[in-house]
Image (cartoon, grey):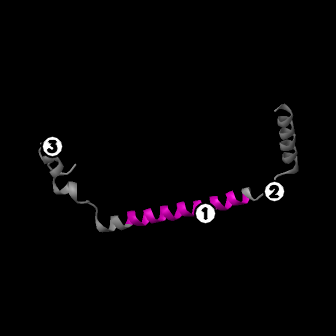
């Protein structure tokens, strides 16, 4: 909540010091964490691409004849009972 919102609600402003407002990391460390974040994003993207490829392969596979026969029998039984 901002100091203005606190004042409107009759609350005293929150005490803050500079350490609360400024990120206390050396510039080199910020670059390292950014590089690590970029690497993690690239890794996730590569995993996503590979998963989509695998999914597409499975979806495009032919259905085995034995499975189709089982489905046909199940359909005929349900139509006889229904």
User: Residue 12 is drawn in which quadrant?
Assistant: top left
Give the left or right position of residue 57, taking residue 30 as reference.
Answer: right
How far across and how far down the image is residue 68, in percent?
85, 47
At 36% from the left edge and 68% from the top edge, which residue is drawn? 31
How far across and how far down the image is residue 64, in percent?
84, 51
Q: Is residue 63 above or below residue 31?
A: above
Q: Is residue 67 above or below residue 77?
A: below
Q: Secondary structure at mark 1?
A: helix
- Residue at label 3? 9
| 10 Å crowding of disc 2: few (<14), some (14-19), many (20+) | few
User: Residue 69 is drawn in which quadrant?
Assistant: top right
Q: Tell me the tag on residue 62.
A: 2
Q: Which residues are magenta?
A: 32-57
Real-space CA distance between mark 1 and mark 2, rounded to the nearest whole angstrom = 22 Å
Query: Which corner quadrant holds the C terminus?
Result: top right
User: In terms of sequence position, does the residue under pointer 3 or pointer 2 come before the other?
Assistant: 3
Q: Tell me the tag on residue 49.
A: 1
At 21% from the left edge and 57% from the top edge, which residue is drawn? 21
Q: Tell me the tag on residue 70.
A: none
User: In terms of sequence position, does the residue under pointer 1 or pointer 3 come before the other?
Assistant: 3
How far across and how far down the image is residue 7, in percent?
12, 47
């Amino acid at each position: 909540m901002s100091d203005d919102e606190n004042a409107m609600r009759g609350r005293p402003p929150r005490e803050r010091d500079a350490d609360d407002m400024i990120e206390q990391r050396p510039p080199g460390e910020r670059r390292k964490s950014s590089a690590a974040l970029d690497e993690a994003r690239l890794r996730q993207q590569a995993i996503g691409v590979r998963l989509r490829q695998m999914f597409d392969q499975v979806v495009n596979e032919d259905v085995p004849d034995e499975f189709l026969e089982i489905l046909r029998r199940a359909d005929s039984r349900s139509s006889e009972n229904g």
